[in-house]
Structure formats: C-alpha cells, structure tokens
Amino acid sequence: MAGLDEAAAVLLGAQRAVILCHQSPDGDTLGSAAALCRGLRQLGKRAAVRCSDPVGKRFRYLFEELPDDEFEPDRIVAVDIADEKLFGEPLRARYGGKADLCVDHHPSNTGYARVNLVDPKAAATCEIVFALLKKMGARIDRPVALALYTGITTDTGCFRYTNVTPATYRIAADLVETGIDAPGVNRALFDTKSRARLEMERRVLDSIRYDCGGRAAVIAVTKKMVAETGASEDDLDGLASIPREIEGVLVGVMLREKDGGEWKVSLRARAPANASAICAKFGGGGHRGAAGCSLRMPLEEAERRLLAAVREALGTGA
C-alpha cells in the first residue's frame, strides 16, 4: 500500500481529476470527495465529483458553491470505495480498471487502483483525506472542514462507535477550530427525522426477529414498506444500526429488498463477532463493526444463511 507522499504526488501531478463516490453514497464518501475536490481546486486543478446515485437532500450542503465541471480527466480518484463493484454500474462501465488512486479505510480493500492509500485504522476515509490535503499544501478552510467533519461524524455514529481513536478526536478538534457549526451538523444528521423516517422505524421495529438467544437481531426493509411510507434514501440511512442498539444484541442484520430478487445486507457487530468476516462468506466485506454484502434469493433463504453464519461467529447452534 502507498503512503501519503506517493498519493500526494499522484494528485499534484494531475491537471483534471474526477473523484468517484460509492453507490448509495454516505457522509464519508461524499465528505471525502467534496473536501478533496475543493482542495484540488484551491491548488489550481480542475476537479469534479461523480456518483452513480443522486446525492440526497441530507448531504447536498456539502456541494454548495461547488459548481460541477465537465472535462476529460487525466486522473481518476476513488474515495471510500473498497472494491470497484461498489462504483455502481454507471461509474463502473466508464471508469472500471482506470482508477489512478484509491483513498480508503476499509480492511477489505481489494487494491484495485494504480496507487492505493488505505489505512484500516482510520475511523473514516475523511481522516486520511485530511492528512492528504495537508501533505499537498491545501488549506483546511471552513468548506473543506465541514465536508471532512461530516464524513467523520457519520462514520463514527457521532463519535459513539469503537472505531474512534485519539487521532479522530484530534482531527475533529482541528476541524471545529475553523469555525464550522459542528453541533448543527450533528443535530441535522442524528437528531432530525422526517415523518416518513419515523414510520419506517415503526415498521422496522415490528419486523424484528431474534436469534442466538437474543444475541442476534434481524430486520427487513421491503420495497413495499418504502413505497407505502414514501421514504427517501436519506430516510433509510442509519436503519441498520437499530438492531445493534438493543440491549444484549451483538449482531444486528438488516436486509433491504432491491430489484431482481436481490437483498442488500447491512450487518453491525460487537466483539467477539466480526461483521466483515461474516459478510466475507457471501462475497462482501467492510469493518469488524460494520460490513455488507448482497444475496439474490428469497428473503427466508437469505435470513437462514445469514443466521447460520452469525451462529458460527457467536459459537452457538441456536
């Protein structure tokens, strides 16, 4: 894996960089991309952000006063993307096999780019982008700091998850010192819910099934539930954490119905369970505490297979 110097050299040698986010974008991939885009423009580069899926209302503030630009890039940069298959089909068709640099914090990163700057100890990719921008000589001004803080607070659950390190707090402190409204960001992202989101939570709570003597909990989000509540992608973000919040639950599983009989799995775990190891059995990956995969089969079969892997991880047959 590359270091900061090599990654910075890739970007400093660029004149026109396209920055890729993963499909179903979250705060870390969008915050990383927005911050890097702003930093490159500070340095006189042309830069633009691309994503296979639209940016939801929840994170649109990251791109205020950051107009889009169309050009033929000389550098392709992926942020917070562990595997090219997470580009989403539109980006994968155009940029697959062409990434010059990947900046990421997932232990399951496949090393698909020409240069890979990957730090699994970082709580968020935005932590790495912070260091990279400083190495490049870019200013951490308020818009950049706001983007980086967004990625860090979303990937740490507002600093509640076990992935938080002393470095995370130090970086966050540096970002807050630029004058950003950190409490406002946290309130908007964690303490503000639409009525559709509350209705989704009610239905999800009704769907909970327990296993492994109460140490595992499973929820399902069907297309019918989404349609009936009118929930947006923003409204669905964070639902996967609900099962793990239940007292005694070590592994929380959310299955979300997609097109073509596919179920997108979001798995959250506490020690001794390893979410990434469980999802790896189904071709997925992520972190010890949070990981994902996809299964194309009926819901009952998907639940059966996942729970079998969870039981194995927890050392229980029931």
Image (tube, helix red, strand yellow):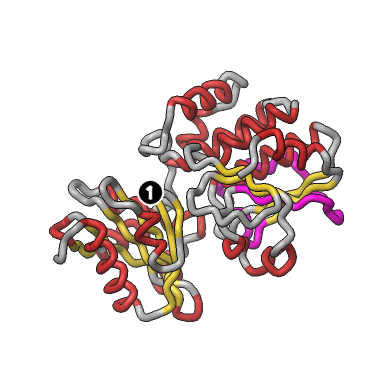
Mark 1, secondary structure of its residue: loop
**Quadrant of res 13:** top right
User: Can you identify the residue that label 1 sits on?
Assistant: 288
- Please say if 299 is above or below 175: below
- Is any part of residue 154 visible from this angle? no
Is residue 60 found inside the magenta-colored segment of the image? yes
| Residue nearest the observer in this picture, 125 or 114 | 114
| Residue nearest the observer in this picture, 276 or 25 | 276
- Please say if 185 is above or below 28: above
Using residue 203 as the reference point, say whether residue 145 is left or right of it: right
Outermost residue on the front side: it is: 1
| Residue nearest the observer in this picture, 19 or 194 | 19
Using residue 249 as the reference point, say whether residue 78 is left or right of it: right
- Is any part of residue 274 visible from this angle? yes
How crowded is the residue under tag 1: few (<14 C-alpha within 10 Å), some, or many (20+)? many
Q: Which residue is pictured at 41% across the width and 74% down the height?
A: 224
- Please say if 239 is above or below 59: below
Q: How many marks?
A: 1
Is residue 139 found inside the magenta-colored segment of the image? no
The magenta-colored residue range is 51-79
Residue 135 is situated, as x and y percent measured from the top left of the image, at: 70, 28
Residue 82 is situated, as x and y percent measured from the top left of the image, at: 55, 54
Residue type at the position of mark 1: Arg
Q: Which residue is pictured at 68% across the width and 43% down the height?
A: 63
Residue 150 is situated, as x and y percent measured from the top left of the image, at: 55, 38
Residue 299 is situated, as x and y percent measured from the top left of the image, at: 34, 76
Q: Which residue is pictured at 63% across the width and 58% down the height?
A: 54
Name the quadrant of the C terminus.
bottom left
